[in-house]
Image (tube, rainbow, N blue to C red):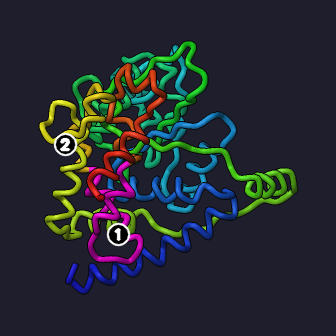
Amino acid sequence: MEDYNDITLLEKLTEARLKLFAEIGQVIIGQREIIDQILISLLSQGHCLLIGVPGLAKTLMIKTLAQALDLQFKRIQFTPDLMPSDITGTEVIEEDKMTGARAFKFFKGPIFGNIILADEINRTPPKTQAALLEAMQEHRVTAAGESYLLEEPFFVLATQNPIEQEGTYPLPEAQLDRFMFSLKVAYPSYEEELEIVKSTTADIESTLKVVISRAEIRSFQHLVRRVPVAQNVIEFAVKLVTASRPIDTGAPDFIRKWVEWGAGPRASQYLILGAKTNAILDGRPTPSIDDVVKMAKPVLRHRIIPNFNAEAEGIDTDLITQKLLDALTS
């Protein structure tokens, strides 16, 4: 980060973040923390799982963010009859009008965008879920033996409804692990809801300006990778993750009591990537342990699997994570 160009880029990013919030604020009331975490995930080249009841403007939030970032937005509504080809694309026989020759032509599916909203991802069978998750991991689609690269930046936001479980296909833990963050979208405050009702029931239409270009996003993503991290910060992230595993000799007693499976190495990687991004968004050239602490719940929420004891006592992953943080920082 001592490079002059990196310092200039850092200053540009902190300024762009303020402009982004000002622009999005014309349409979205509140949800500042969620938008911040989505931005951290995007710049870290991760993906997000958003969990919240219907009507909390999850779709509008993502669409608005795409507009302000000059990214192509695609929405896929997941349903029980959705097929993998409905996501990735399909081959169609096309006839050449000049020669009459027939050949297969690949028509790209909605996965070929920059920001993909996978709406209610748990409403479609595992085979179709896997088609999306493969694209998330590989950033490419394979059809009839041909590989098609997805355009960068490529960012998936999947939503789940936590209250309606009938007719759903929950994502397996191995697939959940592909998401950098699991974010809980909460109800707005009383004051925020007042503003929401006022703005959405009046004849007001906001025109958003592009705040960050596609090329700038790619530059910021590369900048994140160049951010230096102190050894003690990396050690803290790894200790936090390994302490979440009941089989680890250093795991606290409450982990053995409440946890079936702990987080894997990908959690450590995302804790550090998230900490790096959070630091530079704040205008700091390197992250501290506090940045890792801030990333802990969204990174570990879907990676620590509570056991029957925890469920019987009403203990959730956020509480387990908080107790782990308290144990490591006290």
Q: Amino acid at mark 2?
A: Thr
Q: Nearer the viewer, mark 1 or mark 2?
A: 2
Q: Position of residue 44 (x, y in %)?
A: 33, 56
Residue at position x 48%, y 55% in the image? 71
Q: Is residue 87 at all visible to an observer of this figure?
A: yes
Q: Is residue 3 above or below residue 252?
A: below
Residue 279's mark?
Answer: 1
Q: Where residue 50 appears, x then y in whole percent?
A: 50, 40
Quadrant of the snapshot with the N terminus:
bottom left
Say whether residue 53 is magenta: no
**As shown in the figure, which amino acid type bears the numbered disc 1?**
Ala
Tell whether 326 sits left or right of 264: right
| Image quadrant occupied by the C terminus | bottom left
* Closer to us: 163 or 320: 320
Left or right: where 142 falls relative to 75: left
Task: Determine if residue 94 is in view.
Answer: no
Asked whether disc 1 touches disc 2, contact meaning CB atoms under 8 Å apart, the reply is no
Range of magenta residues: 270-296
Q: Which residue: 68% across, 50% down?
A: 188
Mark 2 — residue?
242
Quadrant location of residue 275?
bottom left
Magenta stretch: includes residue 291: yes
Main secondary structure found in the magenta portion: helix
Percent x, y for residue 220?
34, 67
- Residue beneath the point at 28% across and 64% down: 289
Q: Residue at x 87, y 55 (%)?
A: 202
Between 206 and 259, the residue placed more toward the observer is 259
**Spatial CA span between label 1 and label 2:** 24 Å
Against 268, residue 23 (above or below) is below
Picture coordinates of residue 315, whole percent (x, y): 44, 32
